[in-house]
């Protein structure tokens, strides 16, 4: 197993380097870090700033310099706030992680439960109901669901809050935190539950028709044991890839959710940096999101080996 994990990690290193270089080159070719200085009408000021930032060097030299600094935790300073990008990313990542962890855990439990039940009770009334709700959830835009949830549950009935993760003067895990968390997590989870439950249902149906499952039933193994011990574990293997890819993408895909609920996470950080042309923040954001997605792909490979020994042995 250790050899399998090490091999997968080694495969991921060149992918990370290539992806980070392409994203770095894209940002540097699209945005000009010295744009805010051009209003001074002094070409010498702009030229000196370009020399200081190394913008006159070849793109590969700029990348190696940036990468060397990034490895030590130095991602530069924001051109908007003059704050260290590392501190900004750390603060935003903490809030995004809270949404992703809660959203992924709740979504996984609900989706697997619905998927397994629908597969075992195929073509039953609950199966048709879950199927219809899943299609509705997939088709429903997250921003629309979020705005409706705010209008009903935060504005009209005032059951939950819709701004940030804490009220002023509050912190930690308490009732105030839960009331702030419910609506953004629900908005995040609607499409994920719908998608994952459909995928788990299809995977479970394939496994339930396998020879070893029919053999277990022919031997008189209880239905619960057949499902939980023999079918569920193998049915989760394809779903692991979908979950890993989706969770990795969420680190950069919560722009709408965080904007609606005024949460200063990674999505909000990207949106503000894009509007203001904050190059250092954009570079850090894009590379971190890309590395995160690649990391979750690596995690999927490792979980493959844990769930199915045949994969790592091959």
Image (spheres, rainbow, N blue to C red):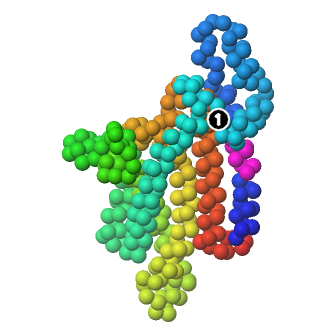
User: Residue at coordinates 46% horizontally, 44% vertically from top-left?
Assistant: 95
The residue sitting at the top extreme is: 41
Is most of the magenta stretch helix, strand or loop?
Answer: helix
The image shows residue 55 at horizontal and vertical percentages of 73, 23
Q: Is mark 1 on a helix, strand or loop?
A: loop
Left or right: residue 188 versus residue 157 is right
User: In the displayed structure, does residue 199 sit left or right of residue 182?
Assistant: right
Q: Which residue lies furthest to the left in this view?
A: 157
- The residue tagged 1 is 75
Q: In this view, does 17 lie above or below 213?
A: above
Q: Nearer the viewer, residue 189 or 173?
A: 173
Q: Is residue 249 magenta?
A: no
- Residue at 62 percent across and 67 percent down: it is 304
Residue at (50, 93) in percent of width and height: 219
Quadrant (top left, top right, bottom left, bottom right) of the C terminus: bottom right
Residue 169 image-quadrant placement: top left
In the image, residue 233 sits, relative to residue 219, either above or below, namely above
Residue 183 in sight from this viewpoint: no
Question: What percent of the width, then of the height, locates residue 301?
Answer: 64, 62
Check the picture and name the quadrant holding the N terminus: bottom right
Q: Which region of the structure is painted magenta?
A: 13-21
Between residues 256 and 9, which one lies in front from this camera angle?
A: 9
Relative to 33, is 201 above or below? below
Question: Whole-percent x and y of residue 225?
Answer: 46, 84
Res. 5 image quadrant? bottom right
């Amino acid at each position: 197993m250790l050899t399998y994990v090490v091999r997968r990690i080694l495969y991921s290193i060149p992918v990370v380097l290539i992806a980070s270089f392409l994203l770095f080159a894209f940002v540097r070719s699209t945005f000009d870090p010295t744009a805010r200085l051009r209003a001074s009408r002094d070409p010498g000021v702009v030229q000196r700033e370009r020399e200081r930032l190394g913008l006159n060097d070849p793109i590969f030299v700029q990348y190696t310099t940036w990468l060397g600094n990034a490895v030590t935790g130095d991602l530069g300073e924001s051109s908007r706030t003059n704050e260290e990008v590392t501190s900004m990313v750390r603060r935003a990542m903490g809030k995004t992680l809270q949404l992703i962890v809660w959203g992924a855990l709740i979504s996984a439990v609900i989706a697997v439960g619905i998927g397994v039940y629908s597969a075992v009770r195929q073509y039953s009334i609950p199966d048709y109901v879950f199927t219809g709700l899943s299609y509705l959830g997939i088709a429903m835009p997250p921003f629309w669901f979020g705005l409706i949830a705010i209008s009903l549950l935060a504005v009209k009935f005032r059951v939950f809050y819709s701004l940030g993760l804490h009220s002023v003067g509050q912190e930690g895990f308490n009732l105030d935190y839960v009331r702030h968390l419910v609506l953004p997590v629900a908005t995040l989870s609607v499409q994920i539950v719908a998608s994952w439950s459909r995928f788990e249902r299809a995977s479970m149906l394939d496994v339930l028709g396998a020879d070893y499952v029919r053999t277990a039933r022919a031997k008189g193994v209880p239905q619960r044991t057949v499902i939980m011990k023999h079918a569920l574990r193998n049915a989760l293997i394809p779903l692991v890839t979908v979950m890993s890819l989706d969770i990795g993408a969420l680190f950069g895909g919560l722009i709408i959710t965080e904007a609606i609920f005024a949460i200063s996470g990674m999505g909000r950080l990207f949106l503000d940096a894009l509007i203001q042309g904050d190059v250092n923040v954009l570079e850090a954001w894009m590379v971190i999101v890309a590395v995160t997605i690649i990391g979750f792909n690596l995690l999927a490979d490792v979980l493959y080996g844990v769930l199915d020994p045949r994969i790592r042995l091959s």
